[in-house]
Amino acid sequence: MNRKDELSVNRRRQIHAAALTCFGQKGFHRATMDDIVAESGLSKGTLYWYFPSKKELFASLLDDAMQQFGNEWQALVASPELGAVEKLKTSLAFFKTEMVKMSPLVDILLEAWSLLRHDEDIEKRLRDFYIPFVDLMTRIIEDGIAEGVFDVDSPQESAIVIVTLFDGILLAISTGLDLGDWNQILDSAETMILRALGVRSESLA
């Protein structure tokens, strides 16, 4: 990466950080591009050079968060030495850790989504975000079937259930629902998933 590209990446990160602060303080609807300019310390021209609108800034934030999530998850399960059960357990532990990090962002995402839910570009981005996550989980399940440790009829459908299950749990946590100890609930979700995939009891620990 040359110096110009590095500066561009750093500027985008600076704007993202400022936007998250402003959205967190005022909400997505009330926060303005002028607020983000003031928080970032950059000129208005610089902000609009990178992001012509608040919608495009939100979309970029969404892209960045999901790409980082996907890259980190992929790196964790990339080792060929890991069996499918270990890859799945590693994935579920990663989801649990990410929930703690991402829960403050969910209010922002929900508000933005409520305002932009009829925007075809945003809808497409959200649909497309699921594809690599479902594909990676599907490959893990297919590996488990090949290894003889998972027993399911449809790896892709099982992958969709697992990925969206954790989305639902994250939403419940972020909205403040007091349904019990969420750490224990997440541990129970892991056990439930492993059993549903046909993992033997001795491999659950």
Image (cartoon, helix red, strand yellow):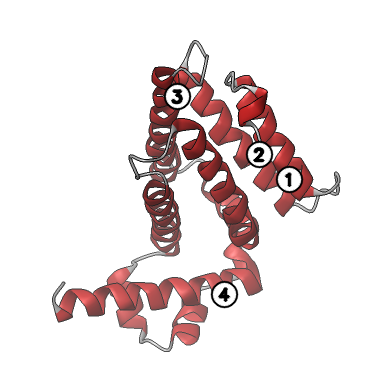
Instruction: Kindly identify the amino acid type of the residue bearing the numbered disc 3.
Output: Gly
Q: Residues within 10 Å of mark 2 (few under 14, many from 20)?
A: few
Residue 111 shows in the view: no
Q: Secondary structure at mark 4?
A: helix
C-alpha distance separating marks 2 and 1: 6 Å
Q: Horizontal and vertical percent for residue 148? A: 46, 17
Separation of residues labelled 3 and 2 (CA atoms): 25 Å
Which mark is drawn over residue 144?
Answer: 3
Label 1 to label 4, Cα distance in Å? 24 Å
The kind of residue on which mark 4 rests is Cys
Q: CA distance from mark 3 to mark 1?
A: 30 Å
133 sits to left or right of 115: left
Q: Which residue is mark 1?
A: 172
Labels in figure, total:
4
Residue 168: mark in rendering: 2
Q: Earlier in the sequence, mark 1 or mark 4?
A: 4
Q: Amino acid at mark 1?
A: Ala
In the rendered view, tell whether residue 154 sits above or below residue 127: above
Name the element at disc 2: helix
Q: Does label 2 or label 4 sit earlier along the sequence?
A: 4
Q: Are marks 2 and 1 in contact (CB under 8 Å)?
A: yes
Nearer to us: label 3 or label 2: 3
Mark 4: few, some, or many residues within 10 Å (few <14, many ≥20)?
many
| Residue 32, visible in the rendered structure | yes
Q: Residue at x 45, y 42 (%)?
A: 126
Which badge, 3 or 2, comes first in the chain's sequence? Answer: 3
Nearest to the eye among marks 2 and 4: give it: 2
Q: Nearer the viewer, mark 1 or mark 4?
A: 1
Q: Earlier in the sequence, mark 3 or mark 1?
A: 3
Q: For numbered disc 3, what is the local secondary structure?
A: helix
Q: Nearer the viewer, residue 146 or 113?
A: 146
